[in-house]
Image: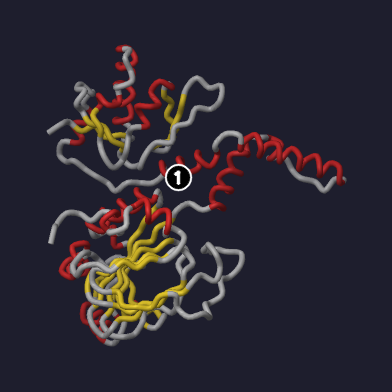
Amino acid sequence: MSNQPIGFDEVIEPLGRERFLSEYWTRKYLHIPGPKGRFTRLLPWEELNTILEWHCPPQPQLRLFQENVMVDLRRYIDGPVGALKLNAGGLIAALAQGASLVLDAVHEVAPRVAHLAGSMGGALASSCIANLYAGWRSQRAFDVHWDPHEVMVLQLSGRKRWQVFAPTRLHPLKDDSEKALPPTASPVWEGIMNDGDMLYLPRGWWHVAYPLDEPSLHVSFGIEPPVGDEFLTWWMQTLRRHPELRQALSSGDAASRENYMAQVIKFLQVSAAGDPLGDFLAERLAGRRVRPRLRLPQAPIEQSKPLGSMATRVRLATTDSLHIEQPAGEPMARFWAAGSYWFIRPEFIPAFQLLSGHRSIPFQDMCAGILDNQLRGMLVSAVDTLAIAGVVFKEEPQ
């Protein structure tokens, strides 16, 4: 079995990305059987043992559930506050009696899972987390429920029986104004998730999983694309620059209320004439944090050294990308990073739009469209300034 990291495209094989996005993504469930061992290298049992043995009990990430009830933490975690330890005897006893182990945010401690979460998030332009579930007996961990995000389940080892039900409310939200009623119809899919299988469930699709009295291990990726109400909230905040929308409201007469509503509609029309949805999506993408990547011992030396080679590689230190704005009538463009606005010349926008938190690029690529030597010198100074501030990393070729 290959030891290469697993990426999003491998997870949805034999479907291509285009077909998955057009036919299934946010629309309907998908079950793809796979060969045994297809996902085992993501997190084998031996690695789970190491995580539990060497990491202090993360709270509330490590939990046990049985028939929709959380097992008392004191049964498997003990010690003084600030020095909690895993009680291995209590843990194994609870698992032997039918509890399921849940390790939330497992991507924080399992590198290959983290790599796949990043690949999924990049492919789907969404934030992505991963939770691990392990069961041994036949008791379920949770009742029939739906999740407020997209779900992609990978069976790493063993088997589980699943039931999937159609949504009873389209696109429900975590803090929805109306409750989604439990399903009364028969499952739209019921079957066994075998080692190597993948199951995709859009937000709001009800489901329940049962262990089959044998060791079972699966990881569930929770994927959160932006939704409409988030966009509207963001858009309304951008309109606060208009004093008319910050003024106090009064009941007044019908004519004054009608006049005020006409002003509001006009502001919305003016704002919509641009591309506010595109701006929102770009800003959200730029706000995604990338996993820390350190190059010790050379990184501190590379950061403080002036950029002197066109082959020096540059990448963003903490974010996925930059959301660059150029307000109308302003001579400079700007972006938000490291807790501050940074201002750049408009000529540099294409260069900075190349930057990514996932890969580095040669500085010569940033200069490709800049022929003026004086401007190139200014771009060098800008990169050096951002490196000192921790916004970008400079990486000398090996």
| Neighbour tally class for label 1: few under 14, some 14-19, many 20 plus, Cα within 10 Å | many
Q: Secondary structure at mark 1?
A: helix
Image quadrant in which the N terminus is located: bottom left
Kindly indicate the quadrant of the structure image that contains residue 62. bottom left
Kindly indicate the quadrant of the structure image that contains residue 85. bottom left
Image: 249 above or below 315:
below
Q: Residue at the spot x=17%, y=31% of the render?
A: 396
Expressed as whole percent of the image width and height from the top left, the position of residue 195 reads: 23, 72
Front residue of 283 and 243: 283
Expressed as whole percent of the image width and height from the top left, the position of residue 139 reads: 34, 85
What amino acid type is highlighted by mark number 1?
Arg
Image: 98 above or below 306:
below
Residue that mark 1 sits on: 284
Give the left or right position of residue 58, taking residue 288 as reference.
left
Image: 383 above or below 245:
above
Q: Residue at the spot x=33%, y=32% of the render?
A: 354
Q: Residue at the spot x=84%, y=41% of the render?
A: 256
Expressed as whole percent of the image width and height from the top left, the position of residue 42 reads: 22, 62
